[in-house]
Image: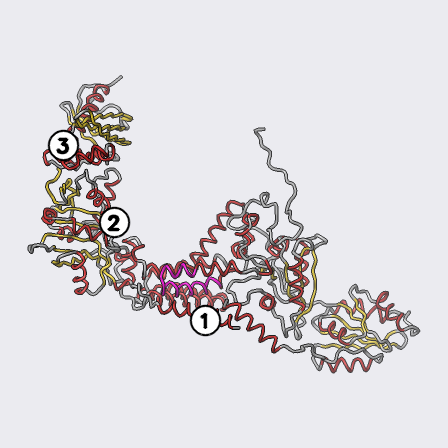
Amino acid sequence: MSKKIKSFNFILIIFIALFLTGCWDNEELDTISIVTGVGIDAADTEGNIKLSLQVGKINQEKSTPQSAGGSDDSIILEIEEKSILTGTNELERQVTRALFMFHNQVIIFGKEQAKKEIKPYIETFIRQNDMRMETLVFISEGEAKDILDIKMEQDKISSFGITKMIEGIQRYDETYSIRVLDLVCMIMDEGTTPVLPILKIEGSDKSRLLLKGLAILDNEKYIGELNETETRGYTWIRGKFKNTFIEVDTEDGLAILNMSNIRYKLKPQIKGEDLIMDLEILGDVVFSEVQGFHNMTIEETTKIILEGAKEKINEEIEASLSKSKKLKTDFLGFGTEYHKRFPKVWEDVKEHWENIFPEISLITNIELNLIDTGKIRNSLDMKEGK
Amino acid sequence: MLFKFIMKKIVAWQNLNSSNHKIDNGLERQISNKLGENIEFIKKVLGGSNDIKIHEFIFGEEFEGAIIYIDGLVNNTEIRESILKPIVFNKKINKENEELSIKEIQKSIICSGDIKRSDMYSVLIDGCLAGATILLINGFRKGLVINTGSWEKRAITEPQTEPVVRGPREGFTEDLRTNTSLLRRRIKSPKFKMENMIIGRKTYTNICIAYIEGLAKPELIKTLRYRLNNLDVDSIIDSSYIEEYIEDYPLSIFATIGYSEKPDVVAAKILEGRVGIIVDGSPFVLTAPMLFVEGFQSSEDYYVRAVYASILRIMRFFAYFVAVYAVPLFIALTTFHQELLPTTFLFSIANAREGTPFPAFIEGLIMVISFEILREAGLRLPRPVGQAISIVGALIMGEAAVSAGIVGAPMVITVAIAAVAGFIIPDQTDSISILRIIMMVLATVLGGYGLAIGFLAVLIHLSILEPFGIPYFASIKFTRDKQDSFTRMPLWIMKDRPKELSATDVKRRDTYVPPDNKDD
């Protein structure tokens, strides 16, 4: 009998315990504000930052049919505080709802703040449980807040627009999608200087965003940026193109090639005292557009175009390398390659890598394989081939 | 544990209240040899019911006889043609030997196959009430009970609960004899046995246990026979009465005895080693035991091609999960785990939830309960009105509740999906409804963690069930049974019967001719 009572009591306790929990993590949807973007700008006061949070606005009106899918508006919350968490805590006391950080899409540092420092603020994003590692990180040309504030033409919340933009680009070029985790890896990596994509507001009504090259963060501080050509060079060396267009502008005419199935091989070598970097790029190309080349056969044209393409790629790589040497910072990741391949040598050189690094000579070997000329063989201007 | 505890309590309480329930109704006595006395007694017992017909007549030289029957339960033509006419027009009857001539009447005069001879009032009256005609003759200490039963019955129609596109369309009726004939026509083996018994102190309901000897487990038949023989109740109106009295887990929300309205389904289950229980007056024939997977098997699975049937099976299991977990999961996701939802989806839900006054659980409860009410209303009302109800329910309630801002549209959609998914598994509808609400409470209190606990608890409960000694999850436990659980293998692969159900006769098929390989 006592056994029965015991088991009965046991079950009773479980039931009571179940209901004593009182739903402590229970948050109804109408009690939270969903943060979609975080902007960090430099403040006038030393040691402070201007924190801007982009909060997706929830539409209360039921009648409008377009309100059904997603939010189309956002609120910007601004505050000047010492750190991100003190800022969000302070903001929570000012707004009606709890700030919900899980769905944060982007972190944008203002250029001015990037010139000061970004490292302590990245810390928050990797330590806090409710911040995700896959949030995209950017540097803004002007103030980060302005980028969060703009209404893009299709996606009214700019952080959604940015995410979609990056996801679109990512299919052929992985350079611009740098997430918190990637950034942290770059910071931790001894041989690599972190880079971050730069966002700039464009368009007459300020409703478009442009990805304008990469910012170089030596010691996690902004020291310079790469223009478009240099960024392409960076992408070639880091092997981040999945497929790309190459514009070949020769004396005879203009051609656009589509390069796909790209394979990269970056091989560090030590020959005597010299450090040599071997870069091999293999890819299939397709003619996408051919203009000019009057009175030339397709064989001649092909030769000229492929040569031109190789030269173009070389130029881009060279531009990026010389920038790197000029700034004396290794954002191309050569140090990491040497660290991986020659860990013992690396131990000796890592202290003065920025001095050794500019001595490296890069040998590129590009092989392009023409697989298709598109739907037509000859251009309209060309001579009839055999 | 709690469950066993309650069961023991109930059993103890029953034993306390049980007493000798055999009631002496004064019928256990011999009849007299005087016709007048006998008629008087029967009149007294059966009272002045106007459907009791007593027809006295004189035949032979000076024999007095009487037939007693209940109007409406007998075939009048048969009484006239095979009882009255042969007796009245027969001139051979003499008064020399009582025993001889009552036998003679039975054997050579009355043209009927089913005749009993008895000298007990109880046998005569029971027979009369079951539709037989009693023949009493003055001077004889024995009467004849002649089966002339014939009454109005429903024709065999297509069952409304289990319609099929392809497959037999016959359905059981309320008549026991019709039902047994439907089964006998499908299983002609001499080993197919049907045991008869009568249960019900007031209703005297005919009950028939149908099984194939040597195929069904002897222990199973023994248990059933024991439980039915020891069942002494007032009334058995429908087969579900029997189900409740003999099932192993009366407090579980899962059924452990199956039912079907289709003879082909019952025949197939009997052929798998189950036992059918046919109850007079009920078109639903019980099959015991019922295993978990049976709720997901449809008769049509075996009539369409195996691949398609397997896809349907998997879909039914999926639908079961949707039916039970869609609403609780929605509650857990929107109140505990917002981070698990895609951002745009979260915004859609947040927009819809904005301005609705109740928490997600209350909102879900409103919708689930109003759905159950509407379903019940649609079922109980006459069909034309039922349709009107569903229109009112679906259009007015759903649409108006959303536009009035009482519930959010995503919740309405979720409840609707869960409801429709629940209809795919008609056998489990009741357990789905109960589980859904339990899971909703767990999801509200503990979120996804609560759902996991609930899922495990249900799983443990299901694995413990062993109706009639056969594991409820047999189809998952035994390799041989798996052929016909989540998928339905082609018939030529399923050459053995389910493991635990069949006793000795295990093989379903011995040989078959595989298709010719043209390349050889």
The disc label shown at residue A9, or none = 1
B437 within the magenta span: yes
Q: Disc 2 and disc 1: Cα gap in Å? A: 46 Å
Tag 2's secondary structure?
Answer: loop
| Residue B258, percent from left and from top | 57, 60
Residue at figure coordinates x 24%, y 25% from the top left:
A367
Tag 1's secondary structure?
Answer: helix
| Amino acid, disc 3 | Ile
- Say above or below: B92 vs B501: below
Q: Quadrant of residue B319?
A: bottom left
Question: Which chain is indicated by disc 2?
Answer: A
Q: Is residue B312 left or right of residue B25?
A: left
| Residue A186, percent from left and from top | 20, 42
Residue furthest to the left? A44
Which range is magenta? B431-454
| Amino acid, disc 1 | Asn
Residue corresponding to mark 2:
A133
Label 2 Cα neighbours within 10 Å, binned few <14 / some 14-19 / many ≥20? some
Question: Which chain is indicated by disc 3?
Answer: A
| Amino acid, disc 2 | Met
Its colouring scheme is secondary structure
Label 3 Cα neighbours within 10 Å, binned few <14 / some 14-19 / many ≥20? some
Residue at figure coordinates x 54%, y 54% from the top left:
B298
Q: Disc 3 and disc 1: Cα gap in Å? A: 75 Å
Question: Which chain is indicated by disc 1?
Answer: A
Residue corresponding to mark 3:
A356
Q: Nearer the viewer, residue A209 or B139?
A: A209
Label 1 Cα neighbours within 10 Å, binned few <14 / some 14-19 / many ≥20? few
| Circle nearer the N terminus (3, 1) | 1
Q: Report if the CB atoms under discs 2 and 1 are less than 8 Å apart.
A: no
| Residue B85, percent from left and from top | 82, 69
| Residue A115, percent from left and from top | 10, 46
